[in-house]
Structure formats: C-alpha cells, structure tokens
Amino acid sequence: MSIANQKGGVGKTTTCVNLAAYLSILGHKTLLIDLDPQGNASSGLGIEKGKGTKTIYNVLSKTNIIAEVIQKTDIENLSVVPATVDLAGAEIELAQMNSRENLLSNILSTIVKEYDFILIDCPPSLGLLTVNALTASNSVLIPIQCEFYALEGLTQLMNTIRLIKHHLNPTLDIEGVVLTMKDNRSNLVQEVSAEIKKFFGNRVFDSTIPRNIRLAEAPSHGEPIAIYDPSSKGATSYLALAQELLKRNGYKIDEREKRNFKRKK
C-alpha cells in the first residue's frame, strides 16, 4: 500500500510511520519502505543513516538485493527499508532503465509473501519514484490536511492513479482518504472536511488525525507515537485508524492486544 499525496506537509510520513507501527503492534508483520529522499520515515523509526548504510537506493540501482537492506526496528513485527538523500538521484537513473515503472514491483515480488502489510512512503511528487510505488501497490492511502487548499492538486493525483491503473497496474485501488491535522474547533475545517467527504464519499476514513504536539515531537526522538507517548491523542487516533483499516480489510481486532506492543530484544 502506498501512502501518497504530491502536496507536501499533509502528514504523509507521519501517517506511514505510525500506521505501520500500530499494524505491527496489532500483530501483523509489516514492512515500511521509505521511498522519499528526505528519509524522514527512516529517522522517525530510529534508523541510523550513517555512511555505509544500505538503502532503497542500493536496491533500485541493483547493487544490493532488498533482503540485504531490510532493518528491524524496536517494535516487534516492524521492519524498514531506509532511504537517504542518495535517493534523490534515482529519478534520473530510473529514466534510463527499461521497464522503469515496474522496477520496484519486480523487487517486491521476491518478498511480498513474507509480510502481511508493505507500506510505501512516497515522495511529495508524482515522479518516477511515486509511479514505481503505485505500480507496485494494491492500493493507495491518501492523507489530506484539513485546510483551505486541501483539494488543490488532487485532480492531478487522481488522474495519475487512473492512468497507472489503466496502463501499468489494474489491481490498484484507493484504500481510502484520511483527514490529518484536524482541529474540530475551526468552522473552516468542518467545511473542508465536508467537501472532502462529498468528493470521496465512503472512501474517507471515520478515524481522523488531530493536530497534536506529541505527534510532532516523536520523530525527533526516533520513535513512533506508540512508543513515544501511547496515551496521547495522536496515538489513540492512529491506533483507531489502524483498527479501521484492518476492519475494512476483513481482519478481526483483538482489543486485548492493542497496547501490548513489544520492543525488539
């Protein structure tokens, strides 16, 4: 599943990191692939990105196989394929390759059966990296910030999804839309939310993500909110989102397990 929106600052990486963490906590073997050259998802899970760190760039450039770059995190069931700024040059290199849109799909075909969920954090653009992510995914989750310009650019994103579904990946579907940075005290937020629901209908998740200082602090500690502050509003919101996602996909939720996460020993 790709987490995508070409508009930056919508909570895309925050959603990818924390959704992956809670899916793992709820007992599902999960892999997060950081496909954003900023590497924020990697940092948010405490991955060291020093010299010599093997990343998704090494896999795309065919110098390593993906099994060699997967790193475990402090949460049981959760692993990550990290990214660094080296990935920024991948767009140019990909453009020279044959079947460039299918490169990531071919890579993931070697490990897909090992995981219950594979989440891909896309860059804030609709370039070749995002096209690769969407071509490799069964579905796409779209975080949308509750602000005046929320729907700006969505037509382009939806058109890209339609084209990829038609030409490259007929199984691609919209997993849903999650409203982020929501402040229920604002009348504008209520109006924007209503417009988004009018546009996407029942694809909008009931679970929404509020503005929350603890969510903003967690990445600087290299921890998802489930570890940094599991009692915060941000944590309970992402837990609810993970549970709703599982329910939509036919999984049963064991309420007893929802907070009993285990760190890696």
Image (spheres, rainbow, N blue to C red):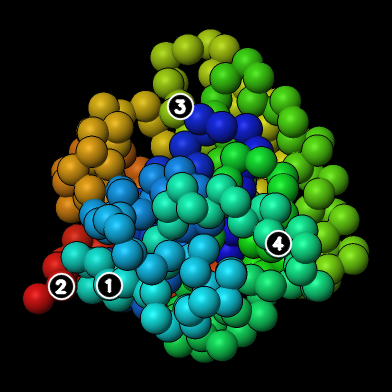
- The type of residue carrying mark 2 is Lys
Residue in the picture at 44% in, 21% down = 184
Residue 3 x %, y %: 56, 52
* Residue at 22% in and 48% down: 222
Cα distance between the residues tagged 1 and 4: 27 Å
Q: Earlier in the sequence, mark 4 or mark 3?
A: 4
First along the sequence among labels 2 and 3: 3
The residue located at (45%, 26%) in the rendering is 182
Disc 1 designates what residue? Answer: 72
Q: In the rendered structure, are the residues bearing label 2 and label 1 in contact, judged by CB atoms less than 8 Å apart?
A: yes
Q: Is residue 63 left or right of residue 166?
A: left
Q: Which mark is residue 182?
A: 3
Distance from label 2 to label 1 (Cα)?
8 Å
- Please, what is the three-letter code of the amino acid marked with disc 3? Lys
Label 2 SS: loop
Q: Which residue is mark 2?
A: 264
Q: What x and y, as percent, mark residue 75? A: 22, 67
* Marks 4/3: CA–CA distance: 37 Å
